[in-house]
Structures are given as C-alpha cells and as structure tokens.
C-alpha cells in the first residue's frame, strides 16, 4: 500500500494560494490590530451619532419593528399616490410619526406598494390613554377607579366605583377620538368593569386613507406586523443575552478542546466580529431586526469555524516544532492553512452574496450581515485571535520561567514555544 | 475492494433510500404518489407562516386580573359565611391592591366573630396580615403560593380556551404555545379575509348569562308614560299567557331604531324613574313586523327590564352544538348544562314559570324566551342576526366554538401581531429558490474547477446532504420559513467547507510525497478534529439561536442544526467512503489523484 511512499509525487494541483507561501501576518500585527480598533471605534462612535446627531436617523440602529415596537403595514394602493400625502393623512389620523417608504415589489405586479411604519401598536396612544384618564374620570355619577391599558393591547378596561352606561362610555370615548367596536361589562356585575374593544390599527389606517384618497384607494393590506414596546424591549434584551450565551458557550468548548490560552483569543475575535457587523448596520442604517440577530449568531458560530482551523494547525505545529519561536510557528500555521481559510470562506461568501443580490426582504438583510460577517470572521481569526494567543502564551511562559528561575538559575531561550502538546 | 466498503455501501444506500422515501410526500404531488408512500409516509415539510401566509399573534394574559378575581370571590365567600353562620350584618368588605381583603366590622367587637371555625377553611388560601380589635379592621392577604397557582391556572386555561376556539375554526396547523406569561398563536394558511374574524373570536370574552325578565312591574309602566314624543322611541305593549295555567302576563317595552337612543334615554332618568340598583336594562335586536305580522326589513332594538343578578352563567355549560330550528329551519345553537348548572337551571326556571328568561352573550340579549316549564340540562339560543342563512350558520358555528371553549379566565391583551398575505410568501420563495440555484451553481463550479474529480465527490456529498437534510425536516414535519430557506442556502455554502479542509490536507500530504492511499487516509484522519470542532461551534451557536428565537428564527435554527449534523455525516464519512471507492479500485497502483 505504501509502495510509492518514497517516490516524490509529481502531482500538480490547481492552486491559487501556492503552498510554501510565507506571508508575514504576525510581524505586522500592529497595523491590523490598529485597523480593527479603528473599525470598532467607528462602530461605537456611529451609534450615538445616529441617535443624536443625524436628524434623519434618530436611533442608534435602524431597529426593526420587532425591536422598536410599533406597527409595520404594507399597503397596496390601487393607483399612484404621493408618499407625502400618505404621511399627511396619517398624521391627521393621529399617527404623527408615520414613516412611509415606497416598497419595491420584486415581481413588478404591484407598482404602488408602500411600507408604512407607525410607532403605535394599538389605536390608543399613551397620550390618549392619559386623555381618557382625565376626561372619563367622571362618567355620570361614577368615578373612574382604574384604567387598564397597555401599548400593545387591542382592548382597554375601565373600572368605575358604580355602574355606568356602556353607550355613554362609547360616546365619551368617541369624543376623545377613540373608535370602538364594542363596549361591554366585564367580569361580575359588582366589579363595574367595562371592556372596550378597539378598532384595529390597520382598519383605522385604511379608513383614513380611503377617506382622503377616495374609496378603494387601498387595494389591499398584505402584511401587518405589530409589536408592543414592552415585547420589543424584551426581544432586545433576549437578543443581547443570547449573543453573550453563544460566546460564553463557545469559549467553554474551546477551553475544553484546546486549553485555556486559546479561549480569550477566540472570544475577542467573536466580539470583534459581532461589533463590526453591528457597525455595518449602523453605518448603512439598514434595518436591524430579529433576523439580523440570527445572522450575528450564525456569524459567531461560523467565525469560529475559521479560528478553529487555524488554531488546530497551530496546536499541531507547536507540538511538532518545539524548537521554533512560538510566533513563527503561528505565522507558519496561518500560511499553511491560508488556502483552506480563504476557500472555505469564499464558498460561503458566494452563496450569501447570491442571496444578497437576488433575495428579498429578510433574506437580503440576513445575507448582507453574513457577507460582512464572513469577511470579518476570516480576518479576525488571523489578525485578532492569533496575536492574542501569542501574547497570552508569552505571559504564560513568563510566569513559568519566573517559577522555574526560583529553583533553577538557567533562563529559557527567549521567545520560545512553551506550549505543551495536547492530544485531542 | 475491502469487504467493509461494501457494508458501508449497503448502509449508505439504505439511508439514501429512506431519505428519498421521506422526501416524496413533500416533493411529488399527491395524486402521483405511489400508494405505499401515501400509506406509510405522510409527513411532509410545512410551509411556515411567512411563506404560506397567515396570522401570528402573541397575547399577554392579564394574570393580575385573575388573581384579583380570586380574591374577590374569597371575600364574598367570607362575607356570606359571616352573615349566615355568625349573624354579622354590618361588614365592610373591600379589596386593596391585588391581594388584600379589608374587612371592617361594625361594631368593632364583632371582629372576634371571625374565628377559627371560619378561618380554618381559608388557612391555605389566605394569610392574616393584621387584626385590630379596637377598630374592627382585619386585613387578609392571598397566600403567595395561591397567587402562583391562580396565575398558572389562568395561563393554562387561557391556552386551552384559545385552542378550543381555534380548533373549532378549522385551521390546518395551529400552534398555540406558552412563553412566560404570553400565549403565542400561529395560524399558517389562514386567508386574509378571515383575519379579523378569528382575531375577534380569540379575543372574545364570551360571557354567557341568563337573567330573568321582571315583567309587569309598575316601573316600566311609569317609564313608558314618561317617554317623550318625537325622539324615535316607541312604547310597545306585549302580552302572553302561560301555557299550562293560562295565566296572562302583560308588559310594556320600549323600541327604537338605535340602541344609543334607548340607552341615552335610560341614562337620563332621575329621581323616581331612575333604574333600581338591582335591576338593569337589556337590549335585543329584533325585526320589524307590519300589521299582518309579516317581517319587514326594519331592525329595532327593544328593551327588557332584567334582574341584575345573573341566575346562571356560561361557567356551567358542558356542551354546545349548532342545530336547526325545527319550525323556521334557521340555524341555532343548543347547549347543555353540567349537573350543577342543570340543578340551578331547574330551580330558577321552576320559580319563574311564565316569565321570560333573557339569554345574554357579551351584554347583548340573544333571545328571551318564555319559560314554559322547568328547564333542566338543555337550552337553545336563537340567533339575533338577520343575514343570509349561510352567514347565520357561520355565526352559529362561531358561537358554538366560543361557548364550548368557555369564557376567558383573564383578559387577553394582544402584544404582537403579524399578518402575512399568501402572495408575499410566493414571491419570496421564488426569489429564494433562484438565489439558491445561483449560489449552488457557483459552489459547484468552484469545486469542479479547483479540485477536479475530487470536486465531484464533494458535489455529490453536498447534494446528498441537501437530500438528507430536507428528508429529516420532512420527518420532523418542520415548517419551512423564509429564514429557514436562508439556512438551507447557507448550508450549501458551508457543506463544502469540510471537504475543502480535508482536500487541502490531502494535498499537503501528497506534497510531502506520500502515496495516494496514505495521503487520503492521513488527510481524513488529521482533518477529523478540525472538522468536528468547526461543526460543534456552529452547532452551539445554533442551539442558542433556537432557544432565543421564536417563529421564523426558530425555523432557521432548526435547518441550521439539522444541516450541521447531516453535513458532518456526508462531508466526512460519506466522502471518505467515496474516496475509498475511487482510490481503492486501482489499489496501491494508483499514482496520482485528481484533487
């Protein structure tokens, strides 16, 4: 079987990165780390800039409706309309913060689609709730004891100290500009609690638009998404927490599979990747939604892919080339795995690019995040994770030397590999 | 060829055949499927809500209200007991906050009457916060364990109620799950036309009440006498006789085209004419009739003078069904009480023979039939609507669904809603498919150019990976969402990663001058842990993603996780086996490898 083991293979491969390449990655690390620091800083600066300086942006990130809370309504008009007119109509109907953008329909069948985003989730705003509390405080002889209202709700509950008439309640609500579909008693009669079912947000918007632009102007409302602000905050919190969990778990795995010195480098690289992807969303002000968080989590997993490939080779070479300086071993390992690193990333980049160019909606945002993430992830495994590993190894070696020098005056040979080989 | 290679061939072949069998129901149209497939393999991939259209709702259960309700019930229980057993007549009962009951005894010395004979029954439910013999004030608080229990119960009951309502509605694959104090409802495939209807069914409070009409009182006559002319309110006398005794009943009611007008009129009555506190006015929508008693298209609202206390409520219902009225042939709803309800009903109807009983649903009188005899376990609701028979039947069915599932235990509050029309999804699927083909083509092309014949192995492995992945998803009956498709596409990109890692390793071994056979074996062996680690880290991220996400994101996480597992299988073991086949065929004589 090993008959040809000693004859040099004459095989030629189709190669782009030639074997034996010896690019200097480690020697120039300070430039690369400098670049990363610039990018991370840019991200950190960009967030408050978006929120406070750029008037047209107004938020740190262009939070999707799932994080910001509010409603996103896709409206299909039957005729050409003016976005400004739509905005004005909505403002008059009680949605002053409406965001109206033309929604490019990929099939071209519905040329007059607009995506409308309003801060409200229900037709009752916080302001109106306050208004209700004031103007409905006295209903006939009854006094309002409690108003149960939530931003996301499609119902409100009013508790009085004595019975009130549902019809006059309906009228009083109408007077403060709240349309109801039903007002009825709730629970036991002694509770004097009244349940108010509100008219849906989309119906309300449709009515307002039809009234202004002529009946039938709104052909259809194919999509509505609304999230209460509380649910949105919860999602933001959950998202941040899950990113942390993912990073933590991966660090534990790396520490377990390699050793402790390999852990921090990977974690810093992961954080670096996550931050820069978020930065890309801050700069482009693309919508940052649940799907984006999913993409960032995927990137975290995927970026590890690259780091593991490089670290695996470092560990292997470190055990083999014990007389070499550790930073040289690392540089050589990076060079040896360069072809793998680049091509594995490239294939993923191909498909995500295809998704970015040809996809729609969430797929596109997801693909954009992946595009950025794959590039940054590949870069960080070489230029971030590896230098940190070298630095930690040095610290570790230094401590060992100090301990040794106490017993033995002989000093180690400078910057040498001190890593113990470890079998997987 | 070694024997083990053939064993593996058989194993992989079997796996592939099973995968294809699982895939058929998803891919092949139903009428073209072979019979045995239809019989044994019915699981298929469902299109997620965002692809097929539908409704995604998140409700928050107002559990505090359920807790407060429990406290109220306990309070009136204790009040009852004190009154009946101890003769306490002057007692102030109040609820403070959500959990506290404040009892104020007058005179304060009565406070001692709240002794162990009563308290022992509430020891589990209530804690005594303070007792003050000098002021006669006792503060009781609902036990924290009880609070938890009530919260849990409200949530569970809420889910059950919603499930009952949705199931009756006939949505194909509803998902109703609990998350914290939220209830998530997903109704894929629901037509946009039904969105409003199902939302109102889910959110409907569905309070069914039976109240006795107080007829022949002089209050209504006095009110009738004070009705001003020209306001659109008619005074209508009515009369009926008891079937058995022939005793006549006479009454008057008010009628108007607008419920508002009537309600305003009653709200405006003061002094002697003010509504007695233990009574209320109920309203029913009725059809106008001409002199000959024929129905006219006019609609009116009429009043009923009702006892406020509901004699019987929907709590005691055991069943409801949509049936047909024997005489008119109109759809109606018949219901049954449980044993306790039947007992109450019997007593109540027995005491009120000849009177009318109003059946109220969510504060509107559906009908008010005359009680002709004792009514036991069964009753009927005729529908107040006047639509076409089909609409009426629909209404009857909705009502049945709502009645069967019972009233909601605590108010529901919608916090999250996504409506997706079916066309949105279709466009998205097409685009996603297209980008998948382009991406796959790019990867295949690259692998073939860069690794030549070995590239074919990687491509075959990638295709098998897709096959297994989709088959497993079908086996799980997973739902495919838009992010899920992204996961599939992404897996194509990642699938060849392991192959590249292994191939580069094999190339290195070949460059060192090893024989093809040794290089292949060494390449696979050395690359294993790298490939494994890379998959595990991806998997960890996928698991976190799964536990974080909801709906579409979960779909993505599932495809990702399944893809990672199948990928490890195809790109490592299956590829290795294929290499063994290629390398082993010419055995050791082979000098070069197309890689």
Image (tube, helix red, strand yellow):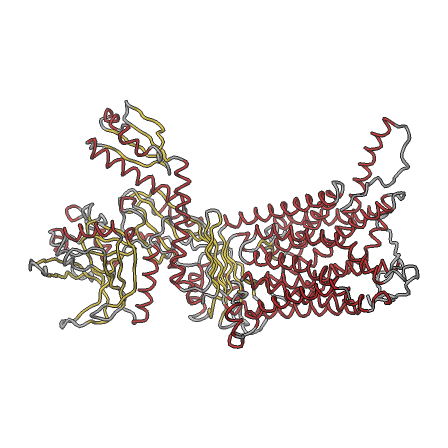
Residue B400 placement (x, y as % from top left): 32, 61
Which quadrant, please, contains the N terminus of chain A?
Answer: bottom right
Q: Is residue A138 above or below residue B78?
A: below
Instruction: Please provide percent x and percent y for residue A153.
Output: 43, 52
Left or right, B84 with reference to A249: left
The residue closer to the viewer here, A94 or B1, is B1
Residue furthest toward the right? A7
> Between B132 and B407, which is closer to the camera in this rendering?
B407
**Residue at the bottom extreme of this rendering:** B32
Across and down, in percent, residue A60 comes to 61, 50
| Outermost residue toward the front in this view | B3
- Residue B163 image point, x, y percent: 41, 56
Report whether B336 appears left or right of B99: left
The answer, for residue B133, to whether it is visible in the render is yes
Residue placed at 66% from the left, 70% from the top? Answer: B437
Q: Is residue B254 left or right of residue A149?
A: left
Q: Could one spot residue A114 in this view of the protein?
A: no
Tell me: residue A9, above or below residue A173: below
Q: Quadrant of residue B149?
A: top left
Q: How many marks?
A: 0
């Amino acid at each position: 079987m090993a008959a040809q083991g000693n004859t040099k293979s004459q095989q030629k491969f189709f190669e782009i990165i030639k074997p034996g390449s010896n690019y200097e990655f480690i020697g120039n690390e300070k430039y690369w780390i400098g670049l990363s620091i610039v990018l991370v800083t840019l991200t950190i600066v960009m967030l408050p800039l978006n929120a406070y300086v750029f008037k047209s942006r107004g938020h740190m990130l262009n939070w999707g409706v799932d994080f910001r809370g509010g409603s996103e309504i896709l409206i299909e008009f039957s005729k050409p309309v003016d976005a400004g007119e739509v905005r004005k109509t909505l403002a008059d109907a009680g949605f002053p913060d409406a965001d109206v953008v033309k929604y490019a329909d990929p099939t071209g069948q519905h040329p007059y689609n607009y995506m409308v985003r309003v801060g409200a989730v229900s037709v009752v705003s916080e302001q109106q709730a306050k208004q209700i509390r004031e103007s409905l405080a006295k209903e006939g002889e009854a006094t309002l004891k409690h108003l149960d209202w939530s931003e996301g709700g499609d119902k409100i509950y009013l508790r009085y100290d004595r019975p009130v008439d549902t019809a006059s309640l309906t009228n009083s609500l109408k007077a403060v500009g709240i349309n109801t579909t039903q007002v009825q008693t709730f629970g036991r009669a002694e509770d004097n609690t009244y349940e108010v079912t509100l008219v849906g947000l989309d119906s309300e918007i449709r009515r307002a638009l039809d009234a202004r632009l002529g009946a039938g102007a709104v052909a259809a409302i194919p999509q509505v998404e609304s999230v209460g602000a509380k649910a949105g905050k919860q999602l933001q919190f959950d998202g941040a927490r899950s990113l942390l969990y993912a990073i933590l778990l991966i660090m534990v795995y790396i520490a377990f599979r390699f050793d402790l010195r390999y852990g921090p480098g990977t974690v810093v690289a992961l954080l670096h990747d996550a931050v820069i992807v978020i930065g890309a969303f801050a700069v482009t002000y693309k919508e940052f939604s649940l799907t984006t968080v999913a993409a960032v989590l995927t990137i975290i997993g995927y970026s590890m892919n690259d780091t593991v490939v490089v670290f695996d080779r470092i560990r292997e070479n470190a055990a083999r080339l014990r007389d070499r300086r550790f930073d040289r071993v690392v540089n050589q390992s990076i060079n040896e795995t360069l072809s793998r690193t680049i091509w594995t990333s490239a294939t993923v980049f191909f498909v995500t690019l295809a998704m970015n160019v040809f996809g729609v909606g969430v797929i596109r945002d997801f693909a954009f995040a992946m595009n950025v993430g794959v590039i940054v992830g590949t870069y960080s495994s070489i230029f971030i994770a590896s230098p940190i590993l070298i630095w930690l190894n040095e610290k570790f070696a230094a401590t060992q030397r100090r301990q040794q020098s106490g017993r033995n005056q002989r000093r180690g040979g400078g910057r040498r590999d001190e890593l113990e080989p470890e079998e997987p | 060829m070694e024997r083990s290679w053939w064993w593996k061939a058989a194993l992989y072949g079997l796996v592939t055949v099973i995968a294809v069998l699982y895939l058929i129901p998803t891919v092949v149209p139903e009428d073209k499927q072979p019979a045995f497939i239809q019989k044994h393999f019915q699981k298929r991939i469902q299109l997620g809500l965002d692809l097929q259209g539908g409704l995604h709702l998140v409700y928050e259960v107002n559990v505090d209200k359920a807790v407060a309700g429990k406290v109220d019930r306990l309070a009136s229980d204790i009040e009852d007991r004190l009154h009946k057993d101890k003769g306490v007549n002057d007692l102030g009962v109040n609820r403070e906050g959500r959990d506290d009951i404040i009892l104020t005894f007058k005179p304060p010395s009565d406070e001692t009457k709240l002794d162990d004979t009563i308290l022992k029954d509430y020891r589990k439910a209530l804690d005594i916060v303070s007792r003050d013999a000098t002021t006669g004030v006792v503060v009781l608080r609902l036990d924290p364990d009880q609070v938890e229990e009530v919260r849990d119960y409200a949530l569970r009951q809420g889910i059950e109620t919603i499930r009952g309502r949705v199931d009756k509605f006939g949505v194909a694959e509803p998902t109703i799950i609990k998350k914290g104090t939220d209830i998530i409802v997903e109704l894929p495939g629901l037509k946009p036309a039904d969105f409003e209807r199902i939302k109102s069914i889910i959110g409907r409070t569905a309070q069914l009440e039976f109240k006795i009409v107080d007829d022949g009182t002089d209050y209504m006559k006095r009110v009738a006498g004070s009705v001003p002319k020209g306001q659109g309110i008619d005074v209508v006398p009515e009369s009926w006789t008891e079937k058995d005794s022939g005793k006549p009943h006479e009454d008057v009611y008010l009628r108007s085209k607008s419920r508002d007008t009537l309600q305003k009129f009653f709200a405006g009555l003061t002094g002697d004419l003010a509504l007695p506190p233990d009574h209320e006015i109920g309203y029913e929508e009725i059809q106008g009739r001409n002199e000959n008693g024929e129905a006219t298209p006019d609609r009116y609202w009429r009043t009923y003078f009702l006892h406020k206390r509901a004699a019987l409520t929907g709590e005691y219902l055991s069943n409801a069904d949509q049936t047909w009225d024997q005489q008119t042939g109109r759809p109606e709803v018949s219901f049954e009480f449980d044993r306790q309800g039947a007992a109450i009903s019997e007593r109540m109807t027995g005491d009120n023979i000849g009177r009318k009983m109003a059946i109220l649903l969510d504060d509107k009188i559906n009908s008010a039939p005359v009680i002709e005899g004792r009514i036991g376990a069964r009753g009927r609701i005729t529908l107040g609507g006047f639509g076409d028979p089909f609409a009426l039947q629909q209404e009857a069915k909705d009502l049945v669904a709502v009645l069967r599932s019972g009233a909601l235990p605590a108010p529901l509050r919608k916090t999250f809603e996504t409506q997706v029309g079916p066309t949105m999804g279709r466009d998205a699927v097409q685009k996603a498919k297209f980008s998948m083909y382009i991406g796959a083509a790019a990867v295949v092309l690259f692998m073939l150019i860069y690794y030549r014949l070995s590239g074919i192995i990687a491509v075959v492995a990638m295709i098998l990976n897709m096959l297994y992945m989709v088959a497993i998803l079908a086996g799980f009956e997973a739902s495919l969402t838009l992010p899920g498709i992204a996961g599939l596409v992404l897996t194509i990109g990642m699938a060849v990663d392991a192959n590249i890692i292994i191939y580069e390793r094999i190339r290195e071994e070949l460059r060192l001058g090893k024989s093809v056979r040794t290089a292949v074996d060494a390449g696979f062996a050395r690359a294993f842990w790298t490939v494994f680690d890379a998959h595990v880290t991806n998997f960890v991220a996928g698991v976190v993603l799964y536990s974080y996400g909801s709906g579409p994101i979960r779909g993505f996480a599932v495809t990702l996780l399944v893809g990672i597992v199948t990928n490890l299988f195809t790109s490592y073991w299956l590829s290795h086996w294929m290499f063994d086949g290629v390398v082993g065929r010419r055995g050791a004589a082979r000098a070069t490898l197309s890689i």
